[in-house]
Amino acid sequence: MPITGTIPSRTELVDHLVRTRIAGEVATPRENNLSHYRKLANGDRHFWLGLELGDRWTDEQDVLAVMAERCGVNDDPDYRFGQDTIDPELTVAALERMAARLRKAAEGRQRVLFATGHPGGLIDVHHSTANALRAAGCDIVVIPDHLQADEGYLFQFADVAMLERGATLWHTHSPEPMRAVLNALKEMGEPLPDLVVADHGWAGCAGQLGVDAVGYADCNDPALFIGEAEGTVQVTVPLDDHVVSPRYYDPMTAYLLSQAGLLDEEPVRST
């Protein structure tokens, strides 16, 4: 398996998340968070991440309340500038909920699709999870060839679907790549995934189209947290989705896979 070494205890993982700023005092400033919450409330679909929110979230304060509850940002509406936070306990609790869904996928040998709009940070998290589910007997969905969306090509690398433009893997919030994949699978007569593990618009679009979806989201991307609150997205894990080193996510991934029972040989758990 790709994840080896020590599986952190819950307490150790919380400490690691804070130390590496995956959670705790994260790099995203408060003013950026509030700007995104306001734009979502004002109906800017770029910030809906593929979800259809209608007129249910037109009050910025309602969005802030959900983010305080599910992500751990500061709940004071008068706090307008400075550092914001992600509660590491909420991160770990969400990882445990995601692990339960991954365990269900493994037990049912389900079809699972992995995708990311943030390849610079999360590709290894998704790839390691895909490897573990394949080893457990799951069918990792291969996306059809030659698909295009948002003036780019859809590309699958290390089992993870991404958007590629000009030989560059693209950071995108758009739901259109996921829509293109699911539509192509239908047209080819292939079954849709039983589960999508993703982030950004890839996860939001899948959930909106009725596919079980779990994913990761930063504190300036409120839509997936709202999606979980409404039941459209099954699990949203709060974290900084692009920290200094992708290796910082390894202990988190090990904890996730251990909780899901997806490590063939359990690494030695630290005490």
Image (spheres, rainbow, N blue to C red):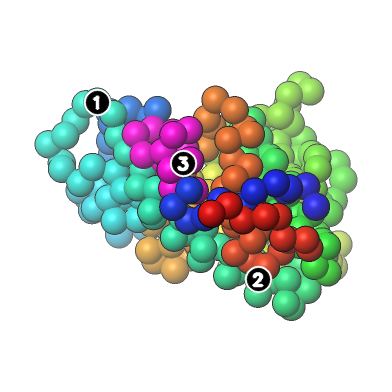
Q: Which residue is mark 3?
A: 17
Q: Can I make out residue 25 in this image?
A: yes
Q: Is residue 132 left or right of residue 178?
A: right
Q: Which residue is mark 1?
A: 82
Pointer 1 or 2: first along the chain: 1
| Mark closer to the observer (1, 2) | 2
Q: Residues within 10 Å of mark 3 (few under 14, many from 20)?
A: many
Residue 76 against residue 20 in the figure, above or below: below
User: In the image, residue 88 lies at what x, y percent?
Assistant: 39, 48
Q: Residues within 10 Å of mark 2 (few under 14, many from 20)?
A: some
Q: Is residue 39 magenta?
A: no
- What secondary structure is marked by label 2? helix
Q: Is residue 16 magenta?
A: yes
Q: Residues within 10 Å of mark 1 (few under 14, many from 20)?
A: few
Total residue callouts: 3
Q: Amino acid at mark 2?
A: Arg
Residue drawn 48% across the image and 40% down it: 16
Q: Amino acid at mark 3?
A: Leu
Residue drawn 64% across the image and 61% down it: 258
Q: Amino acid at mark 1?
A: Gly
Residue lying furthest top: 166
Q: Is residue 114 left or right of residue 25?
A: right
Closer to us: 137 or 232:
137
Magenta region: 13-26
User: In the image, residue 202 lies at what x, y percent?
Assistant: 61, 49
Residue 84 against residue 90 in the figure, above or below: above
User: In the image, residue 29 lies at what x, y percent?
Assistant: 32, 27
Q: Which residue is mark 2?
A: 103
Gap in angstroms between the C-alphas marked 1 and 2:
39 Å
Gap in angstroms between the C-alphas marked 3 and 1:
20 Å
Pointer 2 or 3: first along the chain: 3
| Mark closer to the observer (3, 1) | 3
